[in-house]
Image: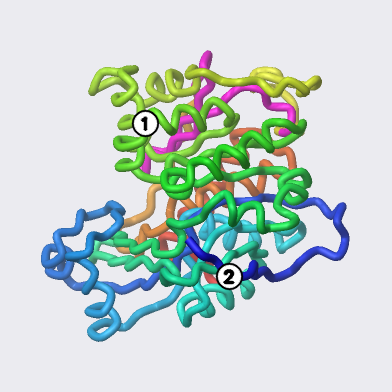
Amino acid sequence: MPSGPIIGNGHDAESSRPVAVVAFCNALLDMSISVADDSLIKKYGLPCDAQIEITSEQQSLFSEVLHNYPVEYVAGGSAQNTLRILCRLVNNKWPSYVVAKIANDPVGIILQKLLAQDGVQTRYVFDENLPTGCCVAIVRPDGTRCLAANIGAAREFSMENLESINDVTDLIDRARVLYIEGFFASHSPDVAMAALIRGHSRCGLVRLFSLSAQYICLQSHSLLRRFLSYSNLVVGNEDEFRALAQCAGLVNHNEPIASVARKIADLEYISPANQVKSCLLADFQGSADWDWSKLNERLVVVTCGASGVVCATSSDSWEFAAVKLQPEEIKDTTGAGDAFLAGFLSQLLVSRPLDVCVATGQQTARIVITQVGCQLPL
């Protein structure tokens, strides 16, 4: 697909400056609306409390939303949500970057402005034929949401686009965390794998892979297992991990989620050849400072909504209860998992223990779901 020039904000003058996260992701503009009932969801055959990519028959949803509802615009896409909130949490102490594809259109301009306001750095490339991706976030009366996306230009990120970003290798080499979004990897697997292999070749990098959505786990489970073999941190929700495990023939339907998580953690893991100083998670136990850069096994982190969080390696698992909110406090669950990951990473970046990472992730998610749109209060 033909592409225009690279666009980016905040090119570092100091090439040795540390980078927090480099994320390969779908860049979307979220259009958030609140509805009094499910009539709009039913009209377009959308799933409740889930996310889909719309079909051509559902395309008119976007114009109906723009014409008939008050819309709040939020820079969206899973990884962009996480980085926006992370930048706020760490007061932009270290830069974080998104690598993605948009168009030079009004939606793309809005998206760039919103990300810049939150301090997220971009390495965008332009597509000349497709529009910037959009997602309608329909917030139901109980605070649950339906996400319907037309990812547009994001789908067409190619190896040629990757090679056109002059400093992308340098950014990966300087990063503490390389984040590959499952949404992105499902349509640009060669780019995702190239980034992971680059990250795998250097010491001291957390290689994070997000499962992103249940339908991706069902449709692309063999592909995801390839990505997981290079990843030492894998995140997702319970439905996603169960779907992946069942497609891989690893579990029975009613198996406890802790067991599911351990089996995913036990899938093939390729240890970096040059990771001389490496640790298992158990080696960190009892220490106040955890050097996550030395982690040389796969840690699985499963968000289970109001039931809490389960973390696991191949040999052990830990369960963390959730602090429950009252129903009237919950305004919008859009991006709750993205917010959790932002909080988790904010503590991982400063070498805090697993329980602190999880607790901060949970606290961040609790704050975000009391707002409309995936964002922290001003």
Residue 371: tell me if it is visible: no
**Quarter of the image where one finds residue 132:** bottom left
**Quarter of the image where one finds residue 88:** bottom right
Q: Secondary structure at mark 2?
A: strand
Calculate the distance from the C-alpha at mark 1 to the C-alpha at mark 2: 33 Å
- Point out the stretch of residues depicted in magenta: 293-317
Residue at x 39%, y 19% (from the top left corner): 259
Position above or below: 304 against 261 = below
Residue at x 46%, y 77% (from the top left corner): 107
> Which residue corresponds to mark 2?
4
**Quarter of the image where one finds residue 39:** bottom left
Q: How many neighbours does mark 1 have within 10 angstroms: few (below 14), some (14-19), or many (20 or more)?
A: many
Under mark 1, the amino acid is His
300 left or right, relative to 274: left
> Which residue corresponds to mark 1?
221
Position above or below: 42 against 160 = below
| Residue found farthest to the front | 2
In front of the other: 289 or 29: 29
Q: Earlier in the sequence, mark 1 or mark 2?
A: 2
List x then y, in percent, for residue 292: 70, 33
Q: Nearer the viewer, mark 1 or mark 2?
A: 2
Q: How many neighbours does mark 2 have within 10 angstroms: few (below 14), some (14-19), or many (20 or more)?
A: few
302 left or right, relative to 245: right
